[in-house]
Amino acid sequence: MQYGATTESWYVAASTHAMDPLERVERLASENAVVIFSVSSCCMCHAVKRLFCGMGVHPTVYELDMEPLGRDIERALARLLGVVPPVVPVVFIGGKLIGAMDRVMASHINGSLVPLLKEAGALWL
């Protein structure tokens, strides 16, 4: 399974001084068609990454437990979702927040996920 490279864009965004974590999330989410904020040891994160890869979509994945500013990003994501504690995975398609695993799976089951992916340019079929 191969995902999009994240190191360069993560550190470019991380090096932007005094950037609010919410602004950082919005910037990272808007740089690629599909962005997944994940934790490397999370089975639900693995499942959502496998879902997208199985559809032929190559998401950009930010493993928050491997990044120096991961905890700040995780808290910002929790604020966006309106949940405590933070929930991963969090998926953005076309720069728009889709949500956590439950929303992604509901979109997949009801047939609305593929049109979102096509609109974002992540899927061509």
Image: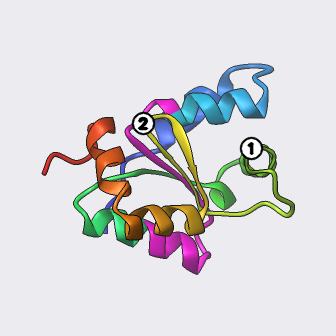
Q: Residue at label 2?
A: 94
Q: Position of residue 27 (x, y in %)?
A: 58, 28
- Location of the N terminus by quadrant is bottom left
Nearer to me, 1 or 81: 81
x then y, percent, for residue 114: 30, 54
- Is residue 102 part of the magenta span, yes or no? no
**Label 2 crowd bin: few (<14), some (14–19), many (20+), radius 10 Å:** many
Q: Residue at x 68, y 61 (%)?
A: 65
Q: Residues within 10 Å of mark 1 (few under 14, many from 20)?
A: some
Q: What secondary structure is found at the residue carrying circle 1?
A: helix
Residue 85 horizontal/vertical position (percent): 85, 64
Q: Which mark is residue 117?
A: none
Residue 34 visible in the picture: yes
Q: Is residue 14 visible?
A: no
* Residue at the disc numbered 1: 80
Which residue in the rendered view is the most extreme toward the top?
17
Circle 2 sits in a helix, a strand or a loop, which is it? Answer: loop
Name above or below for residue 94 compared with residue 58: above
Q: Is residue 31 magenta?
A: yes
Q: How many marks?
A: 2
Q: Amino acid at mark 1?
A: Leu
Q: Is residue 111 left or right of residue 124?
A: right
What residue do we see at 16% from left, 46% from top?
124
4 displayed left or right of 92: left
Residue drawn where x is 61% and y is 75% of the image: 42
Q: Amino acid at mark 2?
A: Gly
Q: Give, as a single range, the part of the protein colored magenta.
A: 30-48
* Above or below: residue 15 compared with residue 111: above
Looking at the image, residue 17 lies above or below residue 82: above
Q: CA distance from mark 2 to mark 1?
A: 16 Å
Colouring used for the render: rainbow
* Left or right: 73 in relation to 60: right
